[in-house]
Image (cartoon, rainbow, N blue to C red):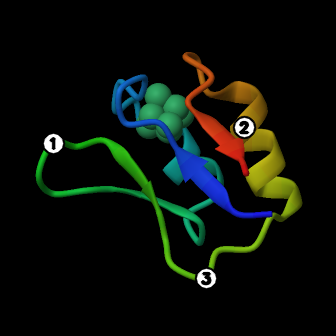
Amino acid sequence: MALRVDNNKCIGCNLCASIAPDAFKLNDINHRSEVIKGAQITDSVKEAIQVCPVEAIGEN
Ligand code: SF4
Protein backbone atom coordinates (compact mmCIF):
# COMPACT_ATOMS: atom_id res chain seq x y z
CA MET A 1 0.00 0.00 0.00
CA ALA A 2 1.26 3.47 -0.86
CA LEU A 3 0.03 6.81 0.35
CA ARG A 4 -1.16 9.37 -2.11
CA VAL A 5 -2.66 12.85 -2.05
CA ASP A 6 -5.05 13.94 -4.77
CA ASN A 7 -3.78 17.40 -5.64
CA ASN A 8 -6.97 18.21 -7.46
CA LYS A 9 -8.87 17.88 -4.19
CA CYS A 10 -6.31 19.20 -1.68
CA ILE A 11 -7.02 22.74 -0.50
CA GLY A 12 -3.68 23.19 1.28
CA CYS A 13 -5.16 23.47 4.78
CA ASN A 14 -2.00 21.91 6.30
CA LEU A 15 -3.91 19.65 8.69
CA CYS A 16 -2.24 16.47 7.47
CA ALA A 17 1.24 17.94 7.77
CA SER A 18 0.44 19.16 11.27
CA ILE A 19 -0.76 15.76 12.38
CA ALA A 20 1.77 13.62 10.53
CA PRO A 21 4.79 15.78 9.66
CA ASP A 22 6.87 12.71 8.84
CA ALA A 23 4.48 11.78 6.06
CA PHE A 24 3.12 14.99 4.54
CA LYS A 25 4.43 18.40 3.60
CA LEU A 26 3.02 21.28 1.60
CA ASN A 27 4.97 21.78 -1.57
CA ASP A 28 6.53 25.11 -2.47
CA ILE A 29 4.86 25.38 -5.84
CA ASN A 30 1.14 25.38 -5.19
CA HIS A 31 1.04 24.74 -1.43
CA ARG A 32 -0.74 21.46 -1.81
CA SER A 33 0.15 18.47 0.30
CA GLU A 34 2.47 15.80 -0.96
CA VAL A 35 3.61 12.54 0.51
CA ILE A 36 7.16 12.48 1.82
CA LYS A 37 9.16 9.72 0.22
CA GLY A 38 9.28 6.59 2.32
CA ALA A 39 6.38 7.61 4.55
CA GLN A 40 4.87 4.79 6.55
CA ILE A 41 1.19 4.39 7.31
CA THR A 42 1.28 5.20 11.00
CA ASP A 43 -1.56 5.95 13.38
CA SER A 44 -0.93 9.65 12.73
CA VAL A 45 -1.26 9.10 9.01
CA LYS A 46 -4.51 7.23 9.55
CA GLU A 47 -5.76 10.15 11.61
CA ALA A 48 -4.77 12.57 8.84
CA ILE A 49 -6.71 10.49 6.35
CA GLN A 50 -9.76 10.75 8.60
CA VAL A 51 -9.58 14.48 9.22
CA CYS A 52 -8.71 15.75 5.76
CA PRO A 53 -11.71 18.00 5.03
CA VAL A 54 -11.84 17.09 1.34
CA GLU A 55 -10.88 13.42 1.62
CA ALA A 56 -7.83 13.97 -0.57
CA ILE A 57 -5.62 11.39 1.14
CA GLY A 58 -5.81 7.75 0.26
CA GLU A 59 -3.89 4.55 -0.11
CA ASN A 60 -3.36 2.59 -3.28
S1 SF4 B 1 -5.53 17.73 5.15
FE1 SF4 B 1 -6.25 17.32 3.07
S2 SF4 B 1 -6.77 19.32 2.23
FE2 SF4 B 1 -5.52 19.66 4.04
S3 SF4 B 1 -3.43 19.86 3.24
FE3 SF4 B 1 -3.73 17.71 3.81
S4 SF4 B 1 -4.42 16.69 1.93
FE4 SF4 B 1 -4.67 18.89 1.64
| Residue with the most extreme bottom position | 38
| Residue with the most extreme right position | 43
Q: CA distance from mark 2 to mark 3?
A: 17 Å
For residue 37, side relative to residue 7 (left or right) = right
The yes-or-no answer for disc 2 within 8 Å of ligand 1 is no
Q: CA distance from mark 1 to mark 2?
A: 20 Å
Residue 46 shows in the view: yes
Q: Residue at coordinates 57% horizontally, 51% vertically from top-left?
A: 4
* Residue sitting nearer the eye, 34 or 22: 34
Numbered label attached to residue 38: 3
Of mark 1 and mark 3, the one earlier in the sequence is: 1
Above-or-below relation of 59 to 14? below
| Residue with the most extreme front position | 60
Residue underneath mark 2: 49
Corner quadrant of residue 30 = top left
* Residue sitting nearer the eye, 39 or 51: 39
Residue underneath mark 1: 30
Q: Quadrant of the N terminus?
A: bottom right
Label 3 environment density (alpha carbons within 10 Å; few <14, some 14–19, many ≥20)? few
Q: Position of residue 32 (x, y in %)?
A: 31, 41
Q: Position of residue 22 (x, y in %)?
A: 59, 72
Of mark 2 and mark 3, the one earlier in the sequence is: 3
Above-or-below relation of 26 to 5? below
Q: Residue at coordinates 84% horizontally, 64% vertically from top-left?
A: 42
Q: What's the amino acid at mark 1?
A: Asn
| Residue with the most extreme top position | 54
